[in-house]
Amino acid sequence: MKSINVVLMSLMFIGLVAGCGGASGSGSSSSKISGETYSTDAMSVLVPTGWKAFPFYKNGNVDDVNPNEIGIHKGAKEAYDMSHTPGMTLYFRPNQSTTSFGKTYYEDVADMEPFTTGDLRWEGFTGKMQIGYGDKRSAVAAIWTSVGNDMFQAFIWLEMDDSKITLNDADVKTILASIVKK
């Protein structure tokens, strides 16, 4: 029975890799990513299997969830894991038309070509940011999109410890394409 499970898992992995190989830099991916929807009073988003969503709190009060911010990290099991797993923080900014991301906080900043996921057109920049103390730097991306008079922003930790994600990963594209304002 174990050998059948190993064969089935191997076939699923091969199918996933083959399905993701042709993904382009814009538009939707042809592969289906499974997961669960995470919702706040302000927004909802699909959290792929293998990722975990975490609420943010107003003024550190665990009884007062901030509906405008969600942390989503790949491979995280608990909130502490966000400090060493790649992932993103999503921000919903009602009645805001300009980004709050400033390039002066980062090194090696490069503007990105705008890209589309689902119905959302994102723009932003990449750079490197110091992590903790010392010389360790992480690749990051700061992106934003307008939805009517509102804005979604995503700060993405592309490299944490030995793990990496990219904006071209099917699961990252799925997260960004699935964001819905409530």
Image (cartoon, rainbow, N blue to C red):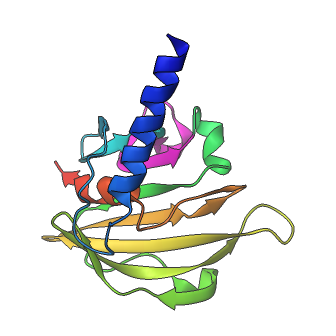
Q: Quadrant of residue 63?
A: top left
Q: Position of residue 16 (x, y in %)?
A: 38, 47
Q: Give the farthest residue toward the top.
A: 1
Q: Is residue 34 above or below residue 137?
A: above
Which residue sits at x=43%, y=45%? Answer: 14
The reply, left or right, for residue 80 in relation to residue 2 is right
Magenta residues span 53-75
Whole-percent x and y of residue 115? 29, 78
State the residue in front, 47 or 31.
31
- The spot of residue 103 in percent (x, y) is 54, 85
Q: Please tell me whether residue 130 is drawn above or below residue 84 in the rendered image.
A: below
95 left or right of 111? Answer: left
Q: Is residue 28 left or right of residue 112?
A: left
Does residue 49 appear in the picture of this structure?
no
Residue 122 visible within the image: yes
* Residue visible at 48% across and 56% down in the picture: 88
